[in-house]
Amino acid sequence: MDRLTVQQLMQFNADWLGTAVVIHVVMSLSLGLLYGLLLARLRPIPAPFVWGGVLMPLLWTAASYSLMGVVNPLLQDRVNWPWFVVSQFVFGIVAAIVIVRSEEILVPPAGRNT
């Protein structure tokens, strides 16, 4: 990427788009799974909405900011951080709503039943 000209960077590249979409899907599914697992198991403080809407977005924003500084410091400067935090807040609230409205299914432990 460092050796590409401005003209090459301005051209559409389907491979880069595909890679970005795959990275986005994997990260979104991983974060959603993490939220789903944690929100269902954490003690209410007073409600899962606090975990999903406050704590998790703050942790994810801190992790993103830190990792962007390592991966690409220029990207860290170009992100609109207030909007990033708001989008994480909205995602956390939506995840909390889904978890709160979902039905708990008891799964017996694995192993022999004697």
Image (spheres, rainbow, N blue to C red):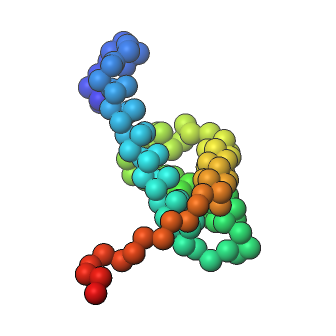
Q: Is residue 46 left or right of residue 3?
A: right
Extreme-front residue of the structure? 114
Nearest the eye: 84 or 32: 32
Q: Residue 86's x, y, as percent?
A: 68, 46
Residue 46, quarter of the rendered image: bottom right
Q: Is residue 83 left or right of residue 59?
A: right
Count every numbered label the image shows and give the total: 0
User: Residue 66: in sight, yes or no?
Assistant: no
Q: Is residue 93 left or right of residue 33?
A: right
Residue 53, quarter of the rendered image: bottom right
Query: Which residue appears at 37% of the width and 25% of the height?
Result: 17
Nearest the eye: 4 or 16: 16
Query: Which residue appears at 58% of the width and 61% of the height?
Result: 103
User: Residue 103: in sight, yes or no?
Assistant: yes
Q: Residue 30's x, y, as percent?
A: 42, 52
**For the N terminus, which image quadrant?**
top left
Query: Which residue appears at 33% of the width and 19% of the height?
Result: 14
Up-down relation of residue 30 to residue 17 (above or below): below
Up-down relation of residue 20 to residue 84 (above or below): above
Q: Residue 10's x, y, as percent?
A: 41, 15
Extreme-bottom residue of the structure? 114
Up-down relation of residue 12 to residue 64 (above or below): above
Q: Residue 85's x, y, as percent?
A: 64, 49
Query: Which residue appears at 34% of the width and 27% of the height?
Result: 18
Extreme-right residue of the structure? 46
Nearest the eye: 56 or 4: 56
Nearest the eye: 11 or 113: 113
**For the C terminus, which image quadrant?**
bottom left
Residue 41, quarter of the rendered image: bottom right
